[in-house]
Amino acid sequence: MADKDIREQIIRSAKDIFARFGFKKTTVDDIAHSIHKAKSSIYYYFGSKEQIFEEVIRREHAYLKDRLREALAAEDTPEGKLRAYVLTRLRVLLKVSNLYGAITSDYLSYFGLIEKLRKDYVQEEIWMFRGILQEGVENGAFQIKSIDTTARTVIIAMKGLEYDWATTEDASELEKDVENILDMVLYGIVAR
């Protein structure tokens, strides 16, 4: 088996094990055993459990970005893109097991590692969301005083809700909450 194939096998197996047991309880021995390899074989490809976890998270984030790009491409209006972005983000994050498994099961124990991984992607998300807002301002759909501040605020607010969303079992209720939040962002709360 080629090195690339073994590396893929390690990542796929680790993804399932991290999802099942969480980062803290998963060991390199668990991963090695699941693919019928020696622990030393795992260390040939990855220097630590943290490196394996980071690669799993990177791939899940790439999956999220791809789904977001697809959702945005399917919409014609800035309002539609904004809704598609937020709802797709929620659906994908609930689907990818490790991003949320890490948050719910090991968040406080491994806050530093998880925050490092999250920070790597915050700027990228702000940039993507900023593009939606910029398009809306340019075509007159949105009236925003500061696109940068608005993009940063909305993304940070969504990230602040992730833990609550991750620990909620009824996804349909979450989507209703998100729709209400989107209405507030799009239309405000002041009677006009």
Image (cartoon, rainbow, N blue to C red):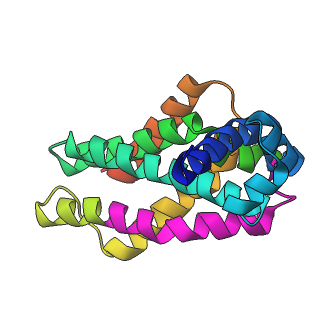
Q: Position of residue 22 (x, y in %)?
A: 80, 43
Q: Is residue 164 left or right of residue 7?
A: right
Residue at point 63%, 56% (across, down): 160
Residue nearest the observer in this picture, 57 or 165:
57
Magenta segment, which residues?
A: 106-130
- Examine the rendering and report whether any part of residue 27 can be seen: no
Which image quarter holds the N terminus?
Answer: top right
Q: Position of residue 121 (x, y in %)?
A: 51, 65
Among the 4 quarters of the image, the one containing residue 174: top right
Q: Main secondary structure of the magenta part?
A: helix
Q: How many marks?
A: 0
Queried whether the magenta region covers residue 98, the answer comes back as no
Task: Identify the residue at image location x=10%, y=60%.
Answer: 139
Q: Position of residue 26 (x, y in %)?
A: 84, 45
Q: Is residue 42 visible?
A: yes
- Camera-side residue: 136 or 114? 114
x then y, percent, for residue 20:
77, 33
